[in-house]
Amino acid sequence: MQQFEPIAALATAPGIGAIAVVRVSGEGAIDITNRIFKGKDLSTQPSHTAHFGTLRQPDGTLIDEVLVTVFRAPTSFTKEDVVEISCHGSDYIIRQILTRLTREGVRLARPGEFTQRAFLNGQFDLVQAEAVADLIAADSEASHRSALSQLRGGFSRKLKDLRQQLIDFVALVELELDFGEEDVEFARRDQLRSLMVDVRRVLHPLIESFSVGNAVKNGVPTVIVGKPNAGKSTLLNALLDEEKAIVSDIPGTTRDVIEDELFIDGIRFRLIDTAGLRHTTDTIEAIGVERTRQQMEKASVVVYLFDGAETTPGELRRTIAELEEAGKPYLLVGNKADLTLDSGRQTLDDIAGKGKIIWISARDQRIDELKAALSLRVRTDSAVQTDGALITNARHLEHLTATDEALARAINGLDAGVTADWLAMDLRVALRHLGELTGEITTDDLLDSIFGRFCIGK
């Protein structure tokens, strides 16, 4: 465990409130707080205990009545001595406490410095440290669950075990280089190949999960498209339960992108209503149609809405072919189910395949099946089959991809019978990226970049 100078910061959100918490961590944190605290002698109190008393200025002037909680190293968040001072949530009181602490030798903390110390002291690895920020920022059940999984170890524990096995093999390969003239083989090539295949088998679903994980973290981009007057704006209003978009019988009313958010089963969806897809000579509407196509390219899910009472079998076939060619996950949604004849629905169902069309009535807000389908689409996406671990961070994706590419080169080299020095070179690259991912290999610039994005007090 490293020893650091004491630091302090407001750990709760800034602003006036009933309660605020000032956190102090580092060498001497308990003794320093004890010098300005009037109550029990904090230096003799056991860890994880709370004590009522007052904080005072050097001349005895009362600052506030407080509750001080003591956490002794190494059983605190930072693995250092930590004190948390719960006071009244007045900006003035908070300033007075922080000023009083700085006069006793405490430094104001930088953004993310408490979590950075926890990482440097071995409380968790770098992936888990980054998950702390994601957990604080989580605004949906899905993003909360993903961050919590990473905070508890998630995929990093498995990667650490595999990395250690790779290290053992690399050591044997490196040893062979010392006996190059003797033509000896310490690392069994069949076992090494099997291990590299196993590592890649773990990496692939994690890499593939990034598109879903990033969407879960930032909201799943969901584009509502279809021909003019299919009911897209009515559907958006029904999903949001408010009059967000203008609804009109005049085709082409929506000419720009309209966006809002919706939570379904704890998943945040970024709903995007777009201009109707059709050929038009109207310059403004044509721009809207082009923006619709751009949004489809960026979407994670495309909701294609069509008028069940007006759409012909030929039109539906062409639509399905275009959606398949686009290669985006999509849901076929038949609107105006209340106005569609049973025979017409049967024909369209036969074309799309049984159960492929979700029938709704946006005007009557009969949309529960669509909500369930959207939730199911995200939860059962093939990229999510990673034992609950999702990649939500671009830095993680970069290192996982680089590791996979290095191992692929090593496997190809092994099959081609390359010498040990070439093999060792690719294995070293793979190990470096795995180490940088979990923080076993770090630079000051990397740590400053990661923890600088945290809020002060965390």
Image (cartoon, rainbow, N blue to C red):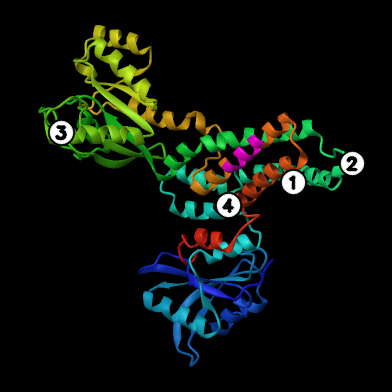
Indicate which label's residue lies in the foreground, 2 or 3.
2
Separation (CA) of disc 2 from disc 1: 23 Å
Rendering coords of residue 226 (x, y %): 24, 25
Can residue 22 be seen here? Answer: no
User: Which residue in the structure is indicated by mark 2?
Assistant: 182
Rendering coords of residue 181 (x, y %): 87, 43
User: Which residue in the structure is indicated by mark 1?
Assistant: 167
Separation (CA) of disc 3 from disc 4: 48 Å
Quarter of image, res 17: bottom left
User: Which residue in the structure is indicated by mark 4?
Assistant: 128
Label 4 SS: helix
Q: Main secondary structure of the magenta part?
A: helix
Q: Earlier in the sequence, mark 1 or mark 4?
A: 4
The residue stretch that appears in magenta: 402-409
What amino acid type is highlighted by mark number 1? Ile
Q: Residues within 10 Å of mark 4 (few under 14, many from 20)?
A: many
What amino acid type is highlighted by mark number 3? Glu
Using the image as rendered, state which of residue 58 and residue 138 is in the foreground. 138
User: Which residue in the structure is indicated by mark 3?
Assistant: 285
Q: Earlier in the sequence, mark 2 or mark 3?
A: 2
What amino acid type is highlighted by mark number 4? Gln
Indicate which label's residue lies in the foreground, 3 or 4.
3
Query: Residues at badges 2 and 1 in contact (C-beta under 8 Å)?
Result: no
Q: Earlier in the sequence, mark 2 or mark 1?
A: 1
Q: Tell me: residue 111, above or below residue 214.
A: below
Q: Residues within 10 Å of mark 1 (few under 14, many from 20)?
A: some
The outermost residue toward the right is: 182
Using the image as rendered, state which of residue 95 and residue 316 is in the foreground. 316
